[in-house]
């Protein structure tokens, strides 16, 4: 969810956002279990701030339940989870893509939903490129449209996209298709900022946002015009939390039907409840330690952070297995490269160059790189003779799995053992987002950052792209060779060649070490058995689109 999606949330307080209990929690009180109203109640740790997909990247949830993507991730993985397009194909030249839109599809207000709307959405974005109010800040962004030569509605059921070079972006992008009749008179300035897109939304997904209270909940109603039929439930209440504690409590009491982002201890406890099913699945999230590699504005406390040798040595001081075993209680895979095992077609374990945990080796490498404890006080100095004292900031991004404070504590302990003291500041979502922003936008000034990122399989390398400094690239690292590799990957359709290029990029960023990938966490989720059926087996609820809210039904008793 490049989703990324990337405002931050606090990870430790067990309280609801805002002063009032969410609508979904009020209408089925804690401790009371009732399926009679047929409303599905969902809880997750997330902090959506707007219903305007052009203005925010923090509201993937709940927008993805209402708006469709043209294709994107789920439609490629699951034939029964299609988006705005029912079918698609590409010509032999790899440039001309044809999308067949669902016939007779309607928007939730009853207006026809056609290829004209899809063409409008992309051309609306494309028309903003290079303008002062370019639409490049939200889920719906201009990124990738540089490869488009034309976007045309051939007829109401046929969309044609012609690209300037072969690229998979036409099917991989996560642009939410919006209705032309709602958005055609909205200026770029308003779309980027002031237009609220207040509910009820007009969309084509199965659940339509009818009410939104920031920091509390979204209330969704079934779309009577949904292309495969009106969903069988009476609606959905998506409750926003800033901690997993009330989610676990709600599942136990029956106040929630489904919860995502549970802690390991909560998951283990819920697994003993006969009324609850727990699940665990790989996701595209990567938890990482980032170094502030900026020079000048926004730089850290020492130039050592800009030195790949210093960063590489730190990598030997971090026990990735211990982070998985102790901080994640086994519910993760050890970190290696910037692409994890969930992206199986590109994952590599880097066995030939992978670092190993060895504090002695870390110290030896620091000595060799010129970071010694010259005065014998137990603290190393940088090359300017200044004692190293690093400032680490941490938190969790909205919509992402919790970044364990235990992993931060382990890292601090290991670095102290090699003569590098670290102070820790834990920030809430807004504060961490501001600190991690690009230095030109007031971010930076920290040394280390422990955070996480989640992205579509095709954009995961954005973590090192200079184009996304302060957005996905929170280390502020810039490398011309890496950027060139990304550009080549973007225009390479052949899978084998693409895999080779991705492997080169993964190895380059691993060697330069602007990040140490700590782990690839698994999603811990749970659902109750008593009210609804139709949940997924592998993924109870998709992280990429509307599933399973198009097909849930009340349990017959």
Image (cartoon, rainbow, N blue to C red):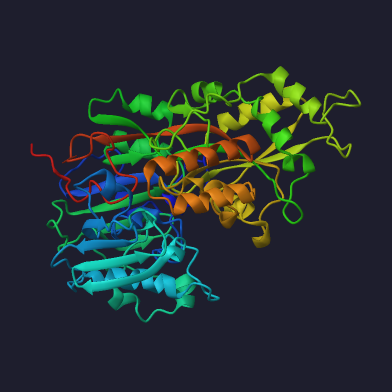
Question: Quadrant of the image for the C terminus?
Answer: top left
Q: Is residue 398 above or below residue 101?
A: above
Q: Is residue 348 above or below residue 40?
A: above
Q: Is residue 207 above or below residue 52?
A: above
Residue 434 horizontal side relative to residue 29, left or right = right
Count of picture labels:
0
Residue at left offset 26%, top offset 41%? 257
Residue 26 horizontal side relative to residue 551, left or right = right
Q: Residue furthest front?
A: 93
- Classify residue 120 by image quadrant: bottom left
Q: Position of residue 222 (x, y in %)?
A: 19, 58
Q: Position of residue 209 (x, y in %)?
A: 29, 61
Residue at left offset 73%, top offset 43%? 306
Residue 533 in sight in this render: yes
User: Which residue is at the front of the view, 149 or 218?
Assistant: 149
Residue 402 in sight in this render: no
């Amino acid at each position: 969810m490049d989703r990324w999606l990337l405002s931050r949330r606090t990870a430790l307080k067990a309280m609801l956002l805002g002063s009032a209990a969410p609508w979904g929690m009020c209408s089925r009180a804690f401790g009371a279990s009732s399926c009679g109203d047929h409303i599905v109640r969902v809880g997750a740790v997330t902090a959506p701030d707007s219903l305007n997909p052009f203005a925010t990247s923090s509201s993937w949830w709940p927008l993805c339940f209402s708006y469709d993507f043209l294709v994107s991730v789920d439609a490629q993985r699951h034939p029964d989870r299609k988006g705005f397009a029912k079918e698609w194909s590409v010509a032999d030249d790899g440039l001309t893509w044809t999308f067949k839109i669902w016939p007779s599809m309607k928007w939730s207000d009853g207006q026809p939903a056609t290829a004209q709307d899809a063409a409008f959405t992309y051309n609306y974005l494309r028309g903003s490129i290079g303008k002062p109010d370019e639409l490049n800040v939200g889920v719906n962004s201009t990124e990738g449209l540089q490869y488009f030569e034309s976007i045309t509605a051939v007829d109401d059921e046929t969309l044609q996209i012609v690209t300037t070079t072969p690229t998979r972006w036409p099917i991989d992008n996560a642009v939410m298709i919006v209705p032309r009749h709602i958005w055609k008179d909205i200026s770029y300035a308003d779309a980027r900022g002031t237009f609220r897109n207040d509910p009820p939304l007009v969309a084509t997904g199965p659940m339509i946002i009818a009410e939104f209270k920031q920091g509390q909940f979204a209330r969704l109603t079934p779309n009577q015009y949904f292309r495969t039929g009106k969903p069988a439930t009476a609606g959905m209440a998506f409750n926003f939390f800033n901690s997993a504690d009330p989610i676990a409590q709600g599942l136990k009491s029956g106040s929630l039907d489904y919860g995502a982002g549970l802690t390991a201890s909560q998951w283990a406890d819920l697994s003993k409840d006969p009324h609850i099913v727990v699940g665990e699945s790989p996701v595209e999230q990567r938890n990482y330690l980032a170094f502030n590699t900026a020079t000048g504005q926004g730089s850290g406390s020492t130039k050592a952070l800009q030195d790949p040798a210093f960063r590489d040595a730190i990598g030997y001081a971090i026990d990735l297995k211990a982070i998985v075993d102790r901080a994640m209680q086994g519910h993760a895979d050890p970190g290696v490269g910037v692409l994890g095992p969930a992206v199986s077609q590109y994952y590599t374990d880097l066995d030939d160059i992978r670092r190993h945990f060895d504090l002695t080796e870390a110290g030896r490498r620091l000595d060799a790189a010129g970071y010694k404890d010259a005065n014998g006080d137990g603290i190393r100095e940088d090359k300017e003779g200044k004692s190293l004292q690093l400032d680490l900031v941490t938190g969790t991004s909205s919509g992402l799995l919790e970044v364990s404070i235990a992993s931060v504590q382990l890292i601090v302990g290991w670095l102290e053992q090699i003569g590098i003291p670290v102070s820790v500041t834990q920030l809430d979502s807004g504060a961490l987002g501001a600190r991690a922003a690009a230095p030109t936008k007031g971010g930076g000034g920290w040394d280390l950052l422990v955070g996480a990122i989640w992205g579509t399989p095709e954009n995961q390398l954005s973590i090192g792209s200079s184009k996304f400094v302060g957005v996905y690239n929170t280390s502020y690292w810039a490398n011309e060779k890496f950027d060139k590799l990304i550009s080549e990957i973007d225009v390479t359709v052949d899978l084998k060649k693409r895999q080779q290029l991705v492997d080169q990029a993964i190895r380059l960023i691993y060697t330069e070490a602007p990040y140490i990938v700590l782990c690839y966490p698994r999603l811990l989720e749970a659902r109750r058995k008593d009210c609804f059926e139709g949940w997924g087996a592998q993924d109870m609820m998709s992280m990429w689109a509307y599933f399973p809210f198009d097909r849930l039904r009340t349990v017959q008793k």
